[in-house]
Amino acid sequence: MNTFKTFMLLLILTLFFIWIGGLIGGKAGMTVALIFAGLMNFFAYWFSDKVVLAMYRAREVTEAEAPELYSIVRSLAQKAGMPMPRVYIINEEQPNAFATGRSPKHAAVAVTTGIMRILSPEELAGVIGHELAHIKHRDVLISTVAATIAGAISYLAQMAQWAFIFGGYRGDDDEGGHPVVALIMMIIAPIIALIVQMAISRSREFAADAGGARIAGNPRFLANALRKLQWATQRIPMHANPATSHMFIVNPLSGKSLVKLFSTHPPIEERIARLEAMSL
């Protein structure tokens, strides 16, 4: 069922991207959008994990380099019946973590140096369990591809904006879309893309919290970790790319008031309440 949902989501987002291309650029715009969508899906599937890890200068570590972290990941992966993912450390003071990879066999878990300093081993296990649940549910692939296409929709709108400014747009219906419709889409396309990204991320965070709690063995491990992470992310900044903020266990941009209005994560208070209800 998850595979079918992933396929349908990618199909809908791709068709939506092509539709916007048609509104802005007519038949030529649809053709360009179709080519871009195909390339994006291919690139996101095979290389998105490497791009994100490189973006944050994540360093792969061995068991000898990070024995406690490696032991937690290995133990929980075995408990979840999953292959051992690669383990990465990001040199960032803000405590945070994310998972990436196209499948459980090609997955990686990345944590910041900050998260290893402020969390207890049990709380870190709750966080790792959450990320392993994302991998097991194949959320990482779907969220990465959705974010890629959402970003491309915004990029397409920006291209159309420049075309209008420099007179590159054609108002002929045979060679281009209606100028008023295209202008409206230039405004709302990035908003729609953000809403899609938010909906995908928010619904899966709750499922990953529940799944991660079961993997770690105690819902309070993750609940306590989320409390500490909420406090820390509001006080310790991180230079995160907004396009990848949904991949982290807590929004790395949560300290910025404007970003809170468009957060890709559900409220931490609600996540904690659901986890604590599981332990009753």
Image: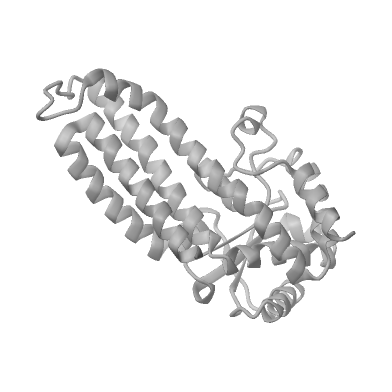
Residue 47 picture quarter = bottom left
Residue 58 picture quarter = bottom right
| Residue beneath the point at 57% across and 48% down | 201
Colour mapping used in the image: one colour
Would residue 201 be seen by someone viewing this image from the given angle? Answer: yes
Would residue 248 be seen by someone viewing this image from the given angle? Answer: no
Image position of 138 with respect to 274: above or below: below
Q: Where is residue 202 in the image (x, y as percent from the top left)?
A: 61, 46
Q: Dividing the image into 4 quarters, which one contains the C terminus?
A: bottom right
Which residue occupies the foreground of this view, 6 or 94?
6
Q: Position of residue 21 (x, y in %)?
A: 26, 37
Image position of 146 with respect to 30: above or below: below
Q: Where is residue 249 in the image (x, y as percent from the top left)?
A: 67, 53
Relative to 258, is 44 on the left or the right? left
| Residue beneath the point at 15% across and 38% down | 28
Relative to 1, is 181 on the left or the right? left
| Residue beneath the point at 28% across and 22% down | 181
Q: Position of residue 271 (x, y in %)?
A: 75, 48
